[in-house]
Image: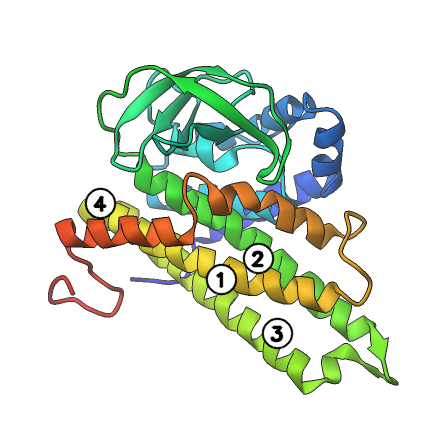
């Protein structure tokens, strides 16, 4: 596979980033917590950039949509970008979200959109009702939902998981940059924090985690188009790696920012808090890995470095 992303996709990400930055950047997250209706404006704004008109069956446009999710993640954009893009090819649905049968929670389900719940085993159900969103340990926009009886299967699960991982990648790369900038500027005992060897080792761990995750995101996006039969397994491999990278990145960020305290005055805290729903719903790391083991048992696993068959 070619790990270089299409130039058109990169340019679209730059357009989305510039547009969101010019209209507020991280202020979108702060404003939405005070005025949840601001999220409707965000959706209309992204629609004006033709994001909801993407043909995600076409590889270049899929890459563009994925990079738009990363751009949204970099500023903790309080809107279900991945969930709407993943539903583009589904009739009668504006957004789709992964939901556990025993934990009917979904972020942004209170928005005026036609939501469809997707279970980990691939079945779907229309969302019939959602509670008002409220500030919880999983974020400010998580809702308890009620769904109709579970019915037919859908093929959007792999795409949704991959796009959510691109969103999380954007959060992690932004957190990495903020942490690196902070330790260069912060001085202690007559030198910058970045000069301490323990800090350098910690930042190296973060760099390895985020760079590896980016390459895996690229591979899995390619796999959705080129290896659809194994796409769901690939997607859960990616999610497992993304959750591990998130633990490393935000742990180091919390530790190094601890010199000034960790509060909402710092943008990295907004990234950390808004990442919780992506990292915990519908399942955390251990449950994701358990689901991955079951998938591998059914379909095998083709890694990026094996070509002769499943491992």
- Which mark, residue 203? 3
- Which mark, residue 228? 4
Mark 1, residue position: 245
- Residue in the picture at 67% in, 86% down: 197
Earlier in the chain: of badge 4 and badge 3, it is 3
Is residue 166 visible in the rendered image? The answer is: yes
Query: Distance of mark 1 from mark 3, alpha carbons?
Result: 12 Å
Give the percent coordinates (x, y) of residue 94. 44, 21
Earlier in the chain: of badge 1 and badge 3, it is 3
Q: Are marks 1 and 3 in contact (CB under 8 Å)?
A: no
Q: Is residue 232 above or below residue 247?
A: above
Give the percent coordinates (x, y) of residue 186. 82, 72
- The residue lying furthest to the front in this view is 102
Which quadrant is home to the N terminus? bottom left
Res 142 → quadrant: top right
Classed neighbour count for the residue bearing mark 1: other residues with Cα under 10 Å, few (<14), some (14–19), many (≥20): many
- Which mark, residue 172? 2
């Amino acid at each position: 596979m070619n790990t270089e992303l299409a130039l058109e996709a990169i340019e679209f990400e730059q357009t989305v980033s510039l547009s969101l930055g010019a209209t507020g950047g991280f202020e979108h997250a702060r404003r939405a917590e005070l005025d949840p209706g601001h999220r409707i404006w965000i959706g209309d704004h992204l629609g004006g950039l033709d994001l909801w008109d993407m043909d995600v069956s076409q590889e270049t446009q899929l890459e563009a949509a994925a990079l738009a999710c990363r751009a949204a993640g970099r500023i903790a954009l309080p809107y279900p970008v991945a969930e709407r893009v993943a539903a583009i090819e589904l009739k009668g649905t504006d957004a789709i979200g992964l939901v556990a049968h025993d934990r009917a929670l979904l972020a942004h389900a209170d928005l005026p959109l036609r939501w469809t719940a997707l279970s980990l085993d691939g079945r779907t159900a229309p969302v019939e009702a959602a509670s008002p969103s409220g500030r919880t340990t999983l974020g400010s926009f998580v809702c308890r939902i009620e769904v109709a009886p579970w019915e037919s299967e859908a093929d959007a699960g792999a795409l949704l998981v991959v796009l959510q991982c691109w969103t999380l990648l954007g959060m992690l790369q932004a957190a990495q940059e903020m942490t690196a900038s902070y330790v260069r500027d912060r001085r202690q005992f007559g030198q910058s924090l970045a000069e301490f060897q323990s800090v350098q080792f910690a930042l190296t761990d973060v760099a390895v985690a985020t760079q590896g995750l980016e390459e895996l995101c690229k591979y899995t996006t390619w796999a959705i188009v080129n290896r659809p039969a194994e796409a769901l397994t690939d997607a859960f491999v990616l999610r497992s790696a993304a959750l591990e990278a998130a633990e490393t990145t935000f742990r180091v960020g919390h530790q190094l920012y601890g010199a000034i305290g960790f509060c909402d005055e710092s943008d990295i805290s907004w990234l950390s808090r808004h990442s919780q729903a992506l990292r915990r719903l519908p399942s955390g790391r251990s449950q994701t890995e358990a689901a991955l083991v079951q998938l591998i048992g059914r379909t095998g696993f083709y890694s990026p470095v094996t070509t002769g068959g499943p491992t």
